[in-house]
Image (cartoon, rainbow, N blue to C red):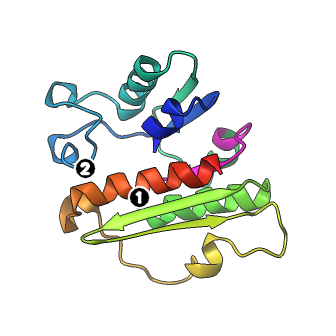
């Protein structure tokens, strides 16, 4: 999603990612290279964004977003893209978006399946991520690294998220 937003000339991007690149990420995160392994993903993303479009202002946070820091990290954002792979983080993002009336573009991919949904939390009567996937449900956390994902699917989901954000 980031490369399409940067290419489109979005003025400011905020990247929050506490992970370091691993070789197992490369088949689905094709913006990176084997030589990048071990480097914080937020740092790598910022470098790629700046190389693609130096006029985009990039702010990075090399940390995991959670319920304690979500509101602070999303402050100043016009729209939020959830490109995460776990329900705890998804619910923290959703709560911050609902609380601060920010549109949320949620995307997920696992195995051969993907989904994209837009939750416009600026409208009080609109549903949110937790309306569809309640936090009280006992969802089994399944990570791409363990369960696998068709690599091109991640690109499709990301491009759809960028499209929805731009709309």
Q: Which residues are magenta?
A: 73-84
Residue 58, percent across and down? 55, 24
The residue identified by callout 1 is: 157
Q: Is residue 66 visible?
A: no
Q: Nearer the viewer, residue 75 or 117?
A: 117
- In the rendered image, the residue lying farthest to the right is 124
Residue 48, percent across and down? 38, 25
The residue identified by callout 2 is: 28
Q: Residue at x 73, y 63 (%)?
A: 120
**Residue 74 position (above or below residue 33):** below
For marks 1 and 2, give the one nearer the viewer. Answer: 1
- Mark 1, secondary structure of its residue: helix
Q: Residue at x 20, y 40 (%)?
A: 22
Task: Give the total of numbered labels.
Answer: 2
Residue 100 in the figure: left or right of residue 46: right
Mark before the other along the chain sequence, 1 or 2 = 2
Q: Is residue 79 visible?
A: yes
Residue 76, percent across and down? 74, 36
Q: Residue at x 70, y 47 (%)?
A: 71
Q: Is residue 37 magenta?
A: no
- Mark 2, secondary structure of its residue: loop
């Amino acid at each position: 999603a980031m490369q399409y937003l940067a290419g489109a000339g979005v003025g400011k991007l905020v990247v929050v990612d506490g992970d370091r690149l691993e070789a197992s990420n490369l088949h689905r995160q094709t913006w990176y290279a084997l030589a990048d392994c071990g480097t914080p993903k937020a740092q790598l993303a910022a470098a790629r964004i700046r190389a693609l479009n130096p006029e985009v202002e990039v702010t990075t946070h090399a940390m995991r977003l959670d319920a304690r820091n979500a509101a602070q990290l999303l402050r100043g954002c016009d729209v939020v893209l959830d490109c995460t792979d776990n329900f705890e983080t998804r619910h923290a993002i959703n709560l911050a978006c609902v609380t601060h009336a920010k549109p949320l573009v949620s995307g997920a991919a696992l195995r051969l399946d993907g989904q994209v949904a837009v939750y416009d939390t600026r409208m009080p009567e609109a549903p949110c991520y937790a309306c569809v996937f309640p936090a009280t449900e006992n969802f089994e956390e399944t990570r791409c690294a363990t369960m696998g994902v068709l690599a091109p699917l991640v690109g499709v989901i990301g491009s759809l998220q960028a499209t929805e954000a731009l709309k």
